[in-house]
Amino acid sequence: MWTWTKRTLLTVVVVAAIFIINGIWFKPFSMRVFYDRSMLEMAGGSPQALTQLRVLEQFGIRGHNAKLDDMSPAAQAEQFAAMKDTYAMFQSYGREGRDGQDLISYDIFDYFFGQMVEGERWQHHGYPVNQMFGVHTRFPQFMTDMHQVGDDTDAEYYLTRLNGVDEQFAGLLESLRVAEAEGIIPPRFVIEAVIGQMDNVIASAPAEHVLVTTFADKLAKTEVTAEAQADFVAQAEVAVRDVVYPAYADLKAYFVNLQGKATDDAGVWKLPDGDDYYAYQLRRYTTTDLSADAIHQLGLSEVARIQAEMRAIFNELGYDAAIPVGALLQVLNESPEFLYPDTAEGREQILADYRAIIDDIYTYIDPAFRLKPQAGLEVVRVPEYAEKNAPGAYYQGPALDGSRPGRFFANLYDIKATPKYGMKTLAVHEGVPGHHYQIALNQEIEGLPIFRSFVPFSVHSEGWALYTEQMMADLGFYENDPHGDLGRLQAELFRAIRLVVDTGIHAKRWSREEAIAYMAAEGGMTMSDVVSEIERYIVMPGQATSYKMGMIKFLEFREKARSQLGEQFDVRDFHDVILKNGPMPMHILERLVDAYVAEKLAAETAA
């Protein structure tokens, strides 16, 4: 018995070694090994991503937790070179002879890597430091939220990262100067915003900085001795004072100097090859070939349709039919019955009410879902240092090792931006069964290449979350709650308006002010939200179109399946197809839905 076990273990080790050696130094035997190696290479290029995923720690591998991402032009060039090599190797396997999930995996990988390789042409066209995201706000949030401290080694790694910020920022500055030399400079408002954000990050005394106080809190929950804890915290304070703050000062100085070179032009049409870049962004985010003009016109028609539905509800509630829908929504936004007190207690109540809403959602969704993620969901506040320019809400996926649940972040900066009548829909979108069901379940997929869980297709993920808002209405979630239904329709209207303003800014040369005026008039949102949203579209061209375009496709596929299957249609089957297969381009998902329909029809015929 012992001898057999020893031989079996030896065989496993040898076979594993063969696969590892083959996967690292040679063209892998199989596509599955190739896929996994490719994803490991991509993740390995970002130690911060590895920290966030926490997949290697369970094997005792954690050296990456002492490193920060390299943001230099040289690192970016290496990444594109590796990407092109990977894609060339992938193409050498060929598509012929593949079927089922093997063919689906092949086509998803082909589409994803093909787009990334194509993107090399515009590698400097984004604004890596902007009011929405960037290392200047991401670094403190990453260290406080993602870098776990469980022992002395983790604490030492934390300090190593603090002391490495100057090198990371120096690499970023190199990349920013390359983009500047090519004529790629953010609009003036972006520069002003990021300077203010950096001032906020370094405003406190080092000993009071969140990077130090949070570190101390983490250490207090470990078995590290009190003496060692005090030493670690003292070192963190020195690192913040001598490394972190000077790094921020250098980055800020660059942007202060850049202000004089910036203009107020908002769209990417102003950049080199800007029109081609925007067309690429639309393909990337919608996975369609629709032109900017076609998407713009679709947005206008959807705005009119949704406002007509809202008008009918307003009429039933007795509102003046002569007042535009956008203005009526503004009335709701200002109505005391839908607002929380602008206090710390009011903000805590918002978080508590979101938790209660999510509990209520669970009582409605069983008729539509068989699958439920194992990971939990918690509602937390957007960090105060980032909330002024952050979106109204967002979702963060759980850690793969189960150490952190999924998180629904609520922005509580402007209390009026969270009217009660819209909270149900936001909880559906960011939480259950929106992003949490989708992303957490994606991470729990078994039997498919790991890349199928993580490749980012915004049209799929955001389209799904918006689709679930409509689906919850179908399940009766807004029954006897006309104001809640107005909140749902306003959320859909908001996404339809995005089709109009995103294309307006980047293809039709609308100014920032024109886009703000349109969204404020038609969407009925608070001005703080309108400004934040428009400024988001300016620095993330095309991304905002993915929500409505994805929703349209999900509804189209569902109704197509329903019409073909008739009484055989079960929406749980349809949702299984979506949730069990991970994110993908819409045309590939349509193939999967068609296959599911064909299989059901064949089974009926056979019976």
Image (spheres, helix red, strand yellow):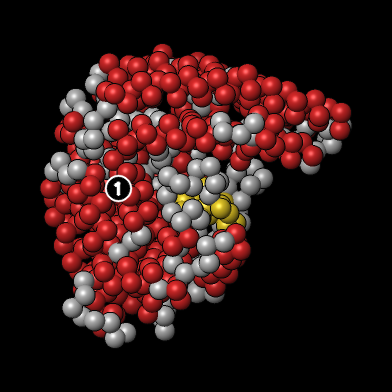
Q: In this view, does 446 lie above or below 76?
A: below
Give the residue type that dot 1 points to: Ile
Q: In which quarter of the image is the C terminus?
A: bottom left
Q: Where's residue 347, x and y in %?
A: 56, 61
What's the residue at 50%, 22% (across, down)?
249
Q: Where's residue 551, x and y in %?
A: 31, 59
* Residue 123 in view: no
What's the residue at 63%, 23% (across, down)?
241
The front one of 267 and 570 is 267
Q: In this view, does 451 lie above or below 404?
A: above
Q: In this view, does 273 lie to the left or right of 520?
A: left
Quadrant of residue 490 within the rendered picture: bottom left
What residue is shown with label 1? 534
The front one of 481 and 347 is 347
Q: How many numbered tags mark residues here?
A: 1
The front one of 102 and 500 is 500
Q: Where's residue 593, x and y in %?
A: 32, 57
Quadrant of residue 7 within the rendered picture: top right
- Find the residue positioned furthest to the top: 74
Query: Regarding mark 1 in the picture, which secondary structure is present there?
Result: helix
Q: Is residue 138 left or right of residue 425?
A: right
Quadrant of residue 93 within the rendered picture: top left
Q: In this view, does 215 lie to the left or right of 140?
A: right
Q: In which quarter of the image is the N terminus?
A: top right
What's the residue at 27%, 27% (across, down)?
262
What's the residue at 32%, 40% (across, down)?
540
Q: How many neighbours does mark 1 have within 10 angstroms: few (below 14), some (14-19), or many (20 or more)? A: many
Q: Where's residue 345, x and y in %?
A: 61, 63
* Residue 133 in view: yes
Q: In this view, does 364 lie above or below 557?
A: below
